[in-house]
Image: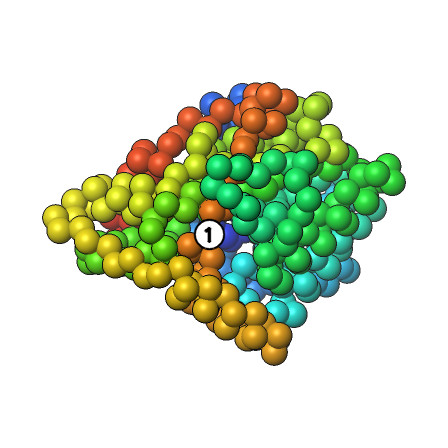
């Protein structure tokens, strides 16, 4: 199998490259994959090349906002794993340029080059939030995109499905949730540091449910989506086996960090809802403030059922919250990332 991975370097993209180039038991042997990565022009490749065997991975420069740079990357490829995306932009327009229009450009290049299957990494944000913690989101639910990020990812999903329904290419859509795992970005390390201090802020009573997507579980789903016959034309929620409450997530990290006097500060739901209002006004101006946006969603349940992926793909997320967070913390310590 010949694969093109977009979104390298990146949190998910780098981890998937690790797994695809080194073998992964979760979805069968993958050592025979021929791997190509799409990287932005001028990307420093020294770290990427150091994580793979010499000559094992080909790096091709390209930019999803510039369609003329993509056809070469997609040539002689069987499957595209499209993980490129912007979550926290400087300006709202970037979300649509990269997440929506960039996905269309990559699809067009894939069709032109004869790619067989296109695996699109979407987001929980296309579905919004749970109407109630007692009702887990399913693939059959009506979409309720959460702000502009959710809209940009939903628009991309519509485009992906249009390409499949018109018979141009096989497609699969995966909707992971809150990532965690090795090679984490600064925002996740900041989360750990906040908990390490012993008095992190929790919005609401901490009972909101969150589905989490440990990176290796997500990568298992990506491989299944690329190879399973039943996956074609389908959308799947991808997360850990069960959702966790905010209190469980924070407490798990605190225990692993051996926080002695763990006393979260609980802020009323009204504070989070005020941030939602502020976020809405800021995004109307075309700008984005990450801290305001995140605070606005932290008291909400965003939890899904993975029953469809389990039944149709044989998806089996082996890593649960405690083990996944333990590995994340271990990675930080091993790589000199201060917590």
Residue 204 in view (yes/no): yes
Considering depth in this image, is 335 or 258 the residue closer to the camera? 258
* Residue drawn at point x = 25 percent, y = 59 percent: 265
Q: Is residue 127 left or right of residue 272?
A: right
Identify which residue is drawn at 70% across, 33% down: 234
Residue found at the far left of this picture: 260
Residue under the point 74% across and 33% down: 233
Q: Quadrant of residue 187?
A: bottom left
Instruction: State the quadrant of the C terminus.
Output: bottom left
| Front residue of this view, candidates 205 and 20 | 205
Q: Secondary structure at mark 1?
A: loop
Q: Position of residue 298 (x, y in %)?
A: 42, 55
**Few, some or many C-alpha atoms within 10 Å of disc 1 (few <14, some 14-19, many ≥20)?**
many
What's the coloring here?
A: rainbow
Residue in the picture at 68% in, 63% down? 96
In front of the other: 60 or 209: 209
In this view, the residue in front, 320 or 220, is 320
Residue 331 lies left or right of residue 64; in this view the side is: left
Position in image of residue 159 (x %, y %): 77, 49
Q: Position of residue 299 (x, y in %)?
A: 42, 54
Q: Is residue 216 in sight in this rendering? A: no
Question: Relative to residue 323, is residue 128 depicted above or below?
Answer: below
Q: Quadrant of the N terminus?
A: top right
Residue lying farthest to the right in this orientation: 166
Residue 211 shown left or right of residue 332 in the figure: right
Pointer 1: what residue?
Answer: 300
Q: What x and y, as percent, mark residue 87?
A: 54, 59
Task: Count the numbered circles shown.
Answer: 1
């Amino acid at each position: 199998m010949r694969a093109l991975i977009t979104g390298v370097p990146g949190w998910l993209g780098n981890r998937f490259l690790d797994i695809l180039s080194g073998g992964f038991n979760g979805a069968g042997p993958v050592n025979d994959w021929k791997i190509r990565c799409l990287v932005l022009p001028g990307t420093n490749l020294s770290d990427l090349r150091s994580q793979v065997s010499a000559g094992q991975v080909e790096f091709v420069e390209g930019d999803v906002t510039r369609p003329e740079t993509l056809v070469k990357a997609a040539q002689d490829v069987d499957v595209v794993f499209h993980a490129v995306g912007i979550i926290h932009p400087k300006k709202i327009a970037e979300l649509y340029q990269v997440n929506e229009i960039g996905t269309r450009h990559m699809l067009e290049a894939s069709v032109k080059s004869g790619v067989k299957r296109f695996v699109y990494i979407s987001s929980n944000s296309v579905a919004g939030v749970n109407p109630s913690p007692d009702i887990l989101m399913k693939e059959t639910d009506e979409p309720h995109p959460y702000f502009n990020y959710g809209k940009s990812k939903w628009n991309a999903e519509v485009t992906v499905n249009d390409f499949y329904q018109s018979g141009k290419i096989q497609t699969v859509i995966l909707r992971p949730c809150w990532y965690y795992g090795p090679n984490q970005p600064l925002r996740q390390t900041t989360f750990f540091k906040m908990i390490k201090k012993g008095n992190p802020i929790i919005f609401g009573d901490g009972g909101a449910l969150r589905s989490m997507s440990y990176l290796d579980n997500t990568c298992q789903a990506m491989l299944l989506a690329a190879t399973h016959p039943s996956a074609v034309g389908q959308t799947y929620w991808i997360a850990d086996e069960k959702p966790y409450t905010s209190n469980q997530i924070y407490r798990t990290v605190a225990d692993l960090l051996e926080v002695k006097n763990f006393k979260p500060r609980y802020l009323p739901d009204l504070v989070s809802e005020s941030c939602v209002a502020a976020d809405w006004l800021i995004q109307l101006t075309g700008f984005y403030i990450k801290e305001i946006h995140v605070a606005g969603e932290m008291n909400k349940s965003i939890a899904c059922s993975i029953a469809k992926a389990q039944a149709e793909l044989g998806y089996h997320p082996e890593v649960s919250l405690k083990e996944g967070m333990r590995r994340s913390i271990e990675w930080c310590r091993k790589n000199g990332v201060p917590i």
